Amino acid sequence: MTQLKWWQKAVFYQIYPRSFADGNGDGIGDLRGMIQRLDYLQDLGIDAIWLSPHYPSPQFDCGYDIADYTDVASEYGTLAEFREFLDGAHRRSLRVILDLVLNHTSDQHRWFLESKSSRDNPKRDWYIWRDGRDDDPPNNWNSTFGGSAWEYDPQTDQYYYHFFFKQQPDLNWRNPEVRAAMWDAVRFWLDMGVDGFRLDAIGTIFEHPDLPDHPVKKSMIELAAARELATTPAEREALAAEWEAMFAYQVEQPGMHELMQELRRVVDEFDDRMLVGENEEIAYHGNGHNELHMVFNFPLMKTRRLTPEWIRANQRQRLAELAAISPDAWPCNTLGNHDASRVKSHYGDGVHDDELARLHLALLLTLRGTPFLYNGEEIGMTDLLLQDIAQFRDQLGVWVYRSLTEELKLPAAFALRRAAEVSRDRARTPLQWANAANAGFSPAGIATWLPVNPNYAQGVNVADQQDDPGSLLNFYRRMLRLRKATPALIAGDYTPIHEEATDYLAFLRRLPAAEGPSCLVVLNFSERPQTLHFELDAVGVRRLFSSRERGSGHDDLAQLYLGPYEAYIGELVAA
């Protein structure tokens, strides 16, 4: 096989610690639960784990408000248990990367507590403090989670800046002491043996140093409401431009690439580690060797519906942009994570959800690039829309509810429904391990940190699917084994064919002849069967996989039959 790094060959699986597995019976996921489920992950067939924040935190933003970068949250366990988890993963040939939140800390971090203690504290300049304008904040910037981006501190009579919640003050990355302290935290985990980092919210690290006002006159909630009510493409486009202008001075500012190059040099002090950014900007690859190893293809995840035409356009643009940077720049694809609707809820049509769930996994595992999966997708977990604002743990949903009811005076029932749809809680509910109390996540009688989705009792759980050969869980296992055993699906070039087709997507994953056979992938996005004719440099195709469970065999390229929503993968037989 073409020589690739481990992270290019791997399939990553995101663990959301609070919701993955409760090992001590307190209703919260933890490291002990993860350790107990390592064999499950190995059997599933993934190669690497992305662990969402496990650090000490007040949990105002579900762990993304970090109070200590070099320890473990007490409700999750201890550093010793983290080492046990890491060593256990490595013994099973599973790599582990951590979430690294660079933009901000918790307001309970000792750095910030020192910084706010007085204007002349040595750590004052570790955060962004400014005088107000009369009785107003320094400028009209918004927090992305609503309200002003500035919080007044009466003790020192200044404002501090926060792009996210006020409980998440932004670090001042123009201060070399901040950089040194954060790079020390990075080295702490790399020294322990962690295999890399997923970088959170990197586009917000710097802001315009002159703090100019943005030009948008509407409030953030007014603009959000207008976007909801827009009915024409022109209206939506104009409002999207206003939204972008509202944050123009707060994101993607100069200095980011130099900072990422500095971080890359730190990571490269260690053998075989990697960085993936929560950002879709190709530019963060740098020259292909000096910034991030990968960035997510978020447009693939953010579209409302995946169609053959849309996927072809996405891949054409994405792969061309990567190739323009470097032949070594590597794609990275995902369809879901802890901030988005679950794949089955997002892309389902309410009728063919099961078939589409299989089809979308086949897409993710056959496109060129590294796939990222989210825990629970393998059993078909779906969004849970909470019915009581008291159940919400995501403060974004709480803010939406309060804004709609208090500022816009909308009915509470409407506001609750809209908040539940926006809240990230919908995709963070406990993983469903069994058809038992609390879905087997926690013992009976224990209140879980978020409610369990009741569909665990309808077969959406690991235990019921474990030994069912037709289950989604076993479909995942078969597809992951196939990908691992098929060099073309990992290293092959991507070549679209039948580009005029609207019902199905067809492409080749090509390897040089000396490295093995190429693969034909055909995904039928229609409820109509297809009989297709392919003119390829091959005498036939050996069936490797079909979601119709047709088994192995040879098929005729001149008359290849696909059933409704079938995913077909075949190995080309050379002429």
Image (spheres, rainbow, N blue to C red):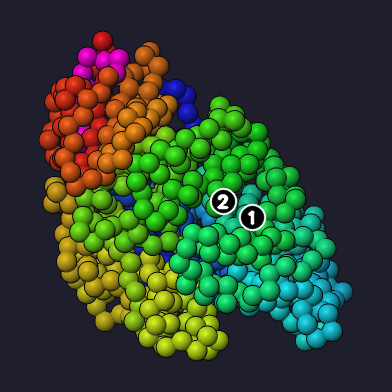
Residue ID at (83%, 68%): 122
Q: Is residue 361 left or right of residue 144?
A: left
**Picture disc at residue 203:** 1
| Position of the N terminus by quadrant | top left
Which of the two labelled residues, at mark 1 and mark 2, occupies the earlier sequence position? 1
Q: Nearer the viewer, residue 32 or 185?
A: 185
Residue 540 located within the stretch drawn in magenta:
yes
Cα separation, mark 1 vs mark 2, equals 7 Å
- Give the amino acid at mark 2: Asn
Q: Nearer the viewer, residue 364 or 483?
A: 364
Image x and y of residue 176, in percent: 80, 55
Q: Nearer the viewer, residue 398 or 482?
A: 398
The answer to whether one can see residue 88 in this image is no
- Give the amino acid at mark 1: Gly
Q: Is residue 351 left or right of residue 199?
A: left
The quadrant in which residue 546 appears is top left
Highlighted range, magenta? 536-546
Q: Nearer the viewer, residue 350 or 438?
A: 350
The answer to whether one can see residue 381 in this image is yes
Q: Are marks 1 and 2 in contact (CB under 8 Å)?
A: yes
Circle 2 residue: 279
Circle 2 — which element?
loop
> Badge 2 local density, few (<14 within 10 Å), some, or many (20+)?
some
Image x and y of residue 85, in percent: 43, 54
Residue ID at (44%, 48%): 300
